[in-house]
Image (spheres, rainbow, N blue to C red):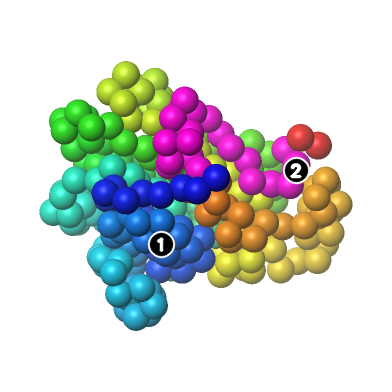
Amino acid sequence: MEIRFDGKRALVTGAGKGIGRDIAKALHKCGADTVALSRTQADLDSLKDECPGIQIVTQDLSDWTGTRNTVSDLGNFDLLVNNAAVARRASFLEYQEKDIDITFDTNFKAVFNVTQVIARGMVERGTGGAIVNISSIAATRAFNSACAYAPSKAALDSLTQVLALELGPKKVRVNSVLPTGVMTDMGRKGLSDPDMVKPFIARTPLGRFAEVEEVTNAVLFLLSDKAAMINGTMLPVDGGYLAN
Ligand code: NDP
């Protein structure tokens, strides 16, 4: 099954590192005119060196007004991947207000903000579009030290469903992808404790974490016309963890 995005314009947030970087590279390879937005300039510069055809944009998504201005200036898009997130881990009794705020500002409010700007353009042009939100299996299962991260992803999935309902009639599809652990910078920080990893893997029927590319493939599928009838779904990329 070949997936192509020739003639489409795509925006990927959090594209400096990890999963977002891989998604941006894959979209570019599949023919999309791709814009990679992230926070650390050095990451974006190295992405540009690797793929000169990708447009890079530096923006801290936790800044509501700055983000709105930056994204509005980027013009119209057919495809959007809301990938950027933070995972500030601490036990519930130790958790600080500033960490709740940064978690929800980045993982939920920024998605709301970016999507409102981009979806408005999709609807006004009447050409429709496809949006994928990168959630997590933590949205639906409890994990220690995820007392803000997990609720932020649950809120994100709820947003996915509401947007699927509101924007579907306007030809904009919205779906979530829910990865299990992936050994990116975020994954390595959260999955370093063998006492946590062992039962996690034992509960996963396929017996391993996901590769970055396996998440990217699910995203490409949902963005593509091959998924033309898929809207408002939560697609786990989890080796069966949620089935167990
Ligand atoms: P990484 O931490 O490796 O990369 C996240 C990227 O998002 C970085 O480029 C980061 O930039 C950027 N980013 C974070 N905050 C902001 C911000 N405020 N403004 C702009 N850019 C920002 O994470 P992953 O690649 O692992 O995660 C990608 C997605 O997958 C996330 O939504 C995550 O929740 C989800 N996920 C990841 C799992 C895993 O185990 N890795 C498991 C399940 C879901 P910078 O480095 O400059 O902060």
The picture places residue 224, in percent across and down from the top left corner, at 43, 41
Describe residue 124's horizontal placement relative to residue 149 as left or right: left
Report which quarter residue 57 is drawn in. bottom left
For the residues marked 1 and 2, what is the alpha-carbon distance in whole angstroms? 31 Å
Mark 1 in CB contact with mark 2 (< 8 angstroms): no
Instruction: Give the residues in magenta.
Output: 221-242
Residue at point 41% right, 62% down? Answer: 29
Q: Is residue 18 above or below residue 148?
A: below
Q: Residues within 10 Å of mark 2 (few under 14, many from 20)?
A: many
**The residue at label 2 has a CB less than 8 Å from ligand 1:** no
Quadrant housing the C terminus: top right
Q: Confirm whether the magenta stretch covers residue 179.
A: no
In this figure, which residue is indicated by the disc labeled 2? 241
Q: Earlier in the sequence, mark 1 or mark 2?
A: 1
- Say what amino acid the circle numbered 2 marks: Tyr
Question: Which secondary structure, mark 1?
Answer: helix
Report which quarter residue 67 is drawn in. bottom left
Residue at point 44% right, 52% down? Answer: 83
- Say what amino acid the circle numbered 1 marks: Lys
Label placed on residue 29: 1
The picture places residue 82, in percent across and down from the top left corner, at 40, 48
Asked if residue 184 shows in the view, the reply is: yes
The picture places residue 192, in percent across and down from the top left corner, at 71, 68
Question: Which secondary structure, mark 2?
Answer: helix
User: Which dot, 1 or 2, sits closer to the camera?
Assistant: 1
Asked if residue 84 shows in the view, the reply is: no
Closer-to-camera residue (173/162): 173
Q: Is residue 184 above or below residue 233?
A: below
